[in-house]
């Protein structure tokens, strides 16, 4: 018996008990192994239920647990840290035939996954809001912004933030007939979710990937109604910026602006 064959047998009930798993009488320990097999799957399903409570609420407990079991057998954990389990779940939902009638479900799962990742991301202190005001206009094309490690962007053709809020808030939430882009970040203790205006997702993702302010603006400006001031206002309001610096350019003697 190898570790690989044991892991496959744990996740696939159609496989026999691995060699070497025996009762005191020397027979294959089918009952005991099946109990262990079931406990492993239940623990993985429970981990997904804890990480995707809105998805579970939307489809109901029975459907969710059946879907989570199928996912667990197809995608076993790659790390012993269970809070990291479920990174493949949104994509799995997107291709899950029984969930096809809920086209928004995978993006709701992506939003919940972003919240999980923001919660467990590294800490960083937001910089003072007035740092942006110190940047000369002539330096926008060389200015880069370092953002919170917890920042995640979810862009969706579905109203995912409104759906999430409607299922996590006691207040009545109207679900608009349009897509919603969301930024998730944890500037303090708990993740915060904010809607993004047109082009805001492209702008933040470009900034997060190391683009300069000028470069990110150029990319986002391809989206109709993109408003740079509005997007910067969201960054400041969400306390996303941790550092303001100038991009290193050969033979450029400009000193870096640090937080």
Image (cartoon, helix red, strand yellow):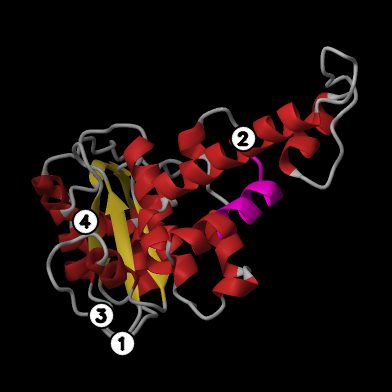
* Highlighted magenta segment, given as a residue range: 67-76
Q: Which residue is mark 2?
A: 40
Quarter-of-image position of residue 10: top right
Q: Which residue is mark 4?
A: 235
Real-space CA distance between mark 3 and mark 2, rounded to the nearest whole angstrom:
38 Å
Q: Nearer the viewer, mark 4 or mark 3?
A: 3
| Front one among 227 and 2 | 2
N-terminal of the two: label 2 or label 1?
2
Q: Nearer the viewer, mark 1 or mark 4?
A: 1
The residue at the far left in this view is 130
Q: Are marks 2 and 4 in contact (CB under 8 Å)?
A: no
**At x 49% / y 77%, what residue is drawn?**
103
In the rendered structure, does residue 74 fall within the stretch colored magenta? Answer: yes
| Front one among 60 and 123 | 60
The kind of secondary structure element at disc 2 is helix
Real-space CA distance between mark 2 and mark 1, rounded to the nearest whole angstrom:
41 Å
**At x 27% / y 64%, what residue is drawn?**
167
Q: Which residue is mark 3?
A: 175
Q: Name the chief secondary structure element in magenta.
A: helix
Q: Are marks 3 and 1 in contact (CB under 8 Å)?
A: yes
In the rendered image, residue 212, in percent from the top left (x then y), is placed at 36, 55
């Amino acid at each position: 018996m190898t570790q690989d064959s044991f892991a496959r047998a744990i996740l696939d009930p159609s496989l026999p008990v691995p060699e070497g798993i025996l009762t005191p009488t020397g027979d294959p320990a089918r009952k005991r192994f099946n109990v262990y097999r079931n406990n492993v799957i239940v623990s993985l399903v429970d981990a997904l239920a804890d990480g995707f409570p809105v998805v579970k609420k939307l489809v109901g407990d029975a459907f969710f647990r059946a879907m989570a079991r199928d996912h667990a057998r197809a995608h076993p954990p790659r790390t012993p840290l269970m809070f990291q389990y479920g990174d493949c779940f949104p994509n799995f939902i997107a291709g899950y035939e029984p969930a096809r009638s809920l086209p928004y479900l995978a993006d709701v799962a992506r939003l919940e996954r972003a919240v999980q990742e923001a919660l467990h991301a590294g800490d960083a202190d937001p910089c003072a809001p007035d740092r942006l005001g110190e940047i000369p206009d002539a330096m926008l094309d060389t200015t880069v912004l370092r953002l919170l490690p917890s920042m995640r962007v979810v862009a969706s053709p579905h109203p995912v933030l409104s759906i999430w809020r409607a299922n996590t808030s006691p207040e009545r939430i109207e679900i608009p007939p349009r897509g919603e882009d969301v930024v998730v970040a944890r500037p303090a203790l708990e993740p915060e979710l904010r809607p993004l205006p047109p082009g805001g997702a492209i702008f933040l993702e470009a900034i997060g990937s190391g683009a300069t302010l000028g470069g990110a603006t150029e990319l986002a400006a391809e989206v109709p109604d993109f408003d740079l001031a509005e997007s910067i206002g969201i960054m400041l309001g969400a306390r996303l910026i941790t550092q303001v610096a100038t991009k290193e350019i050969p033979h450029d003697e400009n000193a870096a602006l640090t937080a």
